[in-house]
């Protein structure tokens, strides 16, 4: 087996050969569109691959893997390009882009859907919601389904139905040798276990088969906003209120400056606010009843929680996370919202300066916690809450200050950290990856890596090293 080393030049004859055999598109630095094709979602990442292989199908993926392997190239794999630290693009080397692979097939009778690796969350929702069905996924429609699923997948209906990985029935995988294998509970079960949380460490997943769940299409959902000055009372009320809420209810606390959006009154724009965004995955009337106490608490400055199509709710955060802005994240799980944790949240929320910086504090539990910890590689099913602290700026201007704010917020929470969701990590080193999986699971994942990718060909990810 060849070793994987960085190389900036890929010989022209080989590129011509790859181009001729390819159904998709092979884009080099001199080609039109190269700059567009090398972009990822996070504008602070600026990398220049030696070659971009835009695969149209499994045959292209296999050809690209073999091409990279035979030449000892560094290889990046891109689904939706939303990796926070930009792990889906490399300098030099080969970028295997799956973005053209958009096939989706819903089988309402079997209650399953198949989706190819280039599908975005909103695309999958659009097809499944046409039948009143859904795969639990994430909360921003332009996120890639592939990367999100491979790390776990948390979102609005997980407390009712589980994580995205919990819906997987089977996957098709191209391994580091360019071989095609299937994985499910009955076939390559060890690989199937690892893929459900272990990220892109074991191969390129080209096709995902999911179980579907009934949903909506109308749901009771949306955010209620209060002034940040009321945050202590709001968060203490919120903690007690969700203490015995049904699994149908999922909430995310948001802190930010009120964004300049058509739904936000002009006099509120730019003011510090705390919001509880909710989604009730059940009958709208039940949702109205369950959410009434929240809507009636204190003096909300804006209430956008109302019956609406699930597809509309899924788009709510899209304008807050545009492509090309500069993003920096810190994340951790905590067991509960103690008064001490709430004090930290309130204190740091008030210090937000950028109009696009925010935190999302995710309520976990429900169906996520009812799957056994050993059943999948995803770790942290008993997390109480997941913090996603993001310091953002539109350009490089002011980015360092936002990063510092995020680091300070995260450090203040350090005494309460219980773990971290692997898909919310930046490039934080091996120890943090180990923390994300826990020592025991990490060792099991390493053993699996030795079986499926002993040379660490797939290394641009939250890397589980084989050694
Ligand atoms: C705006 C935004 C919103 C988000 N919201 C949520 C959310 O609600 N819930 C949640 O759980 N997470 C969320 N995330 C985090 C998200 O899960 C990760 O960023 C995820 O990696 C995105 O997947 P992608 O395909 O877009 O990423 P990419 O950047 O394309 O890939 C991420 C990693 O996965 C690997 N990879 C991608 N596709 C494949 C494949 N087919 N086979 C093998 N490896 C592959 C890549 O090599 C890379 O290492 C969000 C991220 C962003 C930027």
Image (spheres, grey):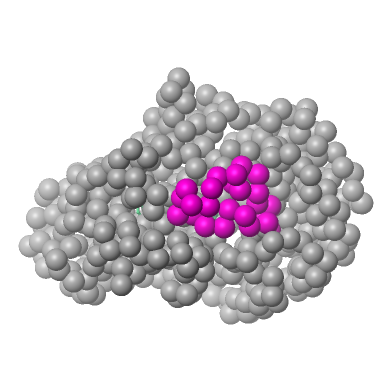
**421 to the left or right of 80:** right
Query: Left or right of 76: which side holds 373?
Result: right
Residue, x 68% and y 56% (percent of image)?
Answer: 384
- Residue sitting nearer the eye, 369 or 299: 369
Drawn side of residue 435 relative to residue 308, left or right: left
The secondary structure that dominates the magenta segment is loop
Q: Position of residue 378 (x, y in %)?
A: 49, 54
Residue 377 appears in view: yes
* Quarter of the view holding residue 394: bottom right
Which quadrant: the N terminus? bottom left
Above or below: residue 354 compared with residue 209: below
On screen, residue 311 above or below 253: above
Q: In this picture, is 113 found above or below 13?
A: above
Residue stretch rendered in magenta on the structure:
358-384
* Farthest top residue in view: 109
State how many labels appear: 0
Provide residue 416's location: percent of width, then percent of height.
69, 70
Q: Quadrant of residue 407?
A: bottom right
Who's the residue at 65% across and 44% down the image?
Answer: 366
Image quadrant where residue 329 sits: bottom right
Residue at 45% from the left image edge and 61% from the top image edge: 441
Along the line of sight, the residue nearer the viewer: 127 or 429: 429
Q: Magenta stretch: residue 373 in it? A: yes
Q: Is residue 304 visible?
A: no
Quadrant of the rendering where the C terminus is positioned: bottom left
Who is closer to the viewer here, 44 or 336? Answer: 336
User: Is 377 part of what is drawn in magenta?
Assistant: yes
Q: Residue furthest right?
A: 298
Residue at the spot x=11%, y=57% of the render?
A: 16
Image coords of residue 249 (percent x, y): 71, 41
Q: Is residue 116 left or right of residue 325?
A: left
């Amino acid at each position: 087996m060849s070793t994987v080393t960085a190389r900036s030049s890929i010989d022209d004859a080989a590129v011509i050969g790859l181009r001729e055999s390819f159904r998709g598109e092979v884009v080099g630095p001199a080609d039109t569109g190269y700059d567009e094709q090398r972009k990822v979602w996070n504008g602070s990442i600026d990398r220049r691959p030696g070659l971009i292989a835009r695969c149209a199908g499994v045959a292209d993926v296999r050809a690209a893997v073999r091409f990279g392997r035979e030449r000892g190239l560094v290889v990046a794999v891109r689904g939706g390009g939303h990796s926070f630290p930009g792990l889906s693009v490399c300098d030099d080397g080969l970028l295997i882009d799956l973005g053209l692979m958009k096939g989706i097939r819903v089988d309402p009778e079997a209650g399953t859907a198949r989706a190819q690796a280039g599908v975005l969350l909103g695309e999958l929702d659009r097809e499944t919601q046409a039948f009143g069905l859904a795969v639990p996924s994430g909360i921003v429609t332009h996120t890639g389904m592939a990367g999100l699923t491979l790390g776990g997948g948390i979102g609005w209906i997980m407390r009712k139905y589980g994580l995205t990985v919990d819906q997987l029935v089977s996957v098709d995988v191209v391994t580091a040798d360019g071989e095609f294998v299937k994985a499910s509970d009955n076939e390559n079960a060890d690989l199937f276990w690892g893929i459900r949380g272990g990220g892109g460490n074991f191969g390129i997943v080209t096709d995902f088969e999911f179980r579907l769940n009934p949903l909506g299409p109308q749901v009771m959902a949306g955010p209620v906003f209060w002034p940040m000055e009321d945050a202590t009372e709001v968060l203490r009320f919120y903690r007690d209120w969700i203490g015995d809420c049904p699994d149908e209810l999922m909430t995310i606390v948001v802190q930010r400056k009120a964004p300049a959006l058509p739904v936000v009154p002009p006099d509120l724009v730019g003011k510090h606010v705390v919001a509880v965004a909710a989604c009730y995955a059940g009958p709208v009337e039940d949702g109205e009843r369950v959410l009434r106490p929240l809507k009636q608490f204190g003096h909300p400055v804006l209430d956008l929680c109302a019956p609406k199509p699930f597809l509309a709710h899924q788009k709510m955060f899209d304008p807050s996370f545009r492509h090309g802005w500069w993003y920096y994240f810190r994340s951790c799980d905590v067991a509960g919202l103690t008064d001490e944790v709430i004090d930290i949240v309130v204190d740091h929320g008030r210090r937000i300066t950028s109009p696009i910086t925010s935190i999302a504090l995710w309520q976990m539990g429900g169906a996520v916690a009812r799957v056994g910890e050993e059943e999948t590689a995803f770790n942290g099913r008993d997390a109480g809450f997941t913090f996603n602290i993001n310091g953002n700026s539109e350009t490089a201007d002011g980015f360092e200050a936002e990063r510092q704010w995020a680091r300070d917020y995260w450090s203040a929470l350090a005494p309460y950290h219980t773990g971290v969701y692997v898909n919310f990590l930046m490039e934080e080193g091996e120890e943090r990856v180990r923390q994300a999986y826990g020592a025991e699971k990490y060792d099991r994942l390493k053993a699996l890596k030795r079986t499926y990718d002993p040379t660490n060909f797939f290394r641009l990810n939250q890397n589980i090293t084989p050694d």
